[in-house]
Image (cartoon, rainbow, N blue to C red):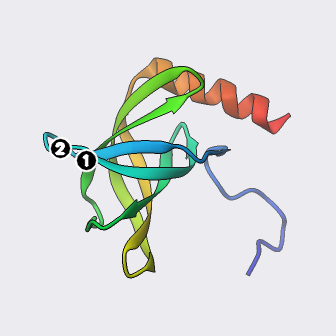
């Protein structure tokens, strides 16, 4: 059901993406996923063939424009799309302040 007031309930503006990213529990080997959207607060991505637990801390590497961003986040939610694929929402807990500025700039341009 939609929001009857029509107000945006998201805390951060999101940028739609469709890029290959890497993610991993901190200090382990990287796995690949596909990002679906990103904001200065977090990233949503699809992961295939792995288990990801609520609250798990992951390192994620993705691109914003021509810049590579590495952030640490906590799994805020995870939804099974099919038996092999998870849709994952990761809330950033550690990200370079310059990356946040870049994300804020890009979301401001996307909103225009």
Residue 30 higher or lower than 88, as above or below: above
Q: Is residue 51 left or right of residue 21?
A: left
Quadrant the N terminus occupies: bottom right
Q: Quadrant of residue 94?
A: top left
- Number of residues whose C-alpha sits closer than 10 Å to that of mark 2, classed few (under 14), some (14–19) or many (20 or more): few
Kindly indicate whether the residue at mark 2 contacts the one at mark 1 (C-beta within 8 angstroms): yes
Q: Position of residue 14 (x, y in %)?
A: 64, 45
Q: Position of residue 42 (x, y in %)?
A: 48, 45
SS at mark 1 in the image:
strand
Q: Is residue 36 left or right of residue 54?
A: right
27 and 102: which one is in front? 27
Residue 7 higher or lower than 2, as above or below: above
Which residue shows up at 56% across the image and 44% down it? 38
Q: Quadrant of residue 2?
A: bottom right
SS at mark 2 in the image:
loop
7 and 78: which one is in front? 78
Q: Distance between the Cα atoms at labels 1 and 2?
A: 6 Å
Which residue shows up at 68% across the image and 28% down it? 106
Between circles 1 and 2, the one closer to the viewer is: 2
Instruction: Tell me, for residue 6, which label it has, or none.
Output: none
Q: Is residue 55 left or right of residue 89?
A: left
Sequence-wise, which precedes: disc 1 or disc 2?
1
Pointer 2 residue: 29
Q: Position of residue 86 (x, y in %)?
A: 41, 69
Which residue shows up at 82% across the image and 74% down it? 4
Q: Quadrant of residue 93?
A: top left
Residue 60 higher or lower than 68, as above or below: below
Instruction: Tell me, for residue 24, which label it has, or none.
Output: 1
Q: Is residue 48 left or right of residue 57?
A: right
Quadrant the C terminus occupies: top right
């Amino acid at each position: 059901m939609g929001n009857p007031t029509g107000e945006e309930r998201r805390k951060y503006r999101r940028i739609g993406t469709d890029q290959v990213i890497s993610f991993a529990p901190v200090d382990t080997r990287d796995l690949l996923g596909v990002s679906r959207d990103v904001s200065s607060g977090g990233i949503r991505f699809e992961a295939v063939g792995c288990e990801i637990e609520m609250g798990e801390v992951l390192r994620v590497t993705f691109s914003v424009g021509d810049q590579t961003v590495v952030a640490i986040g906590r799994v805020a939610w995870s939804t099974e799309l099919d038996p092999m694929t998870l849709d994952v929402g990761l809330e950033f807990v550690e990200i370079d302040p310059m990356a946040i500025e870049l994300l804020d700039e890009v979301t401001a341009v996307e909103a225009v």
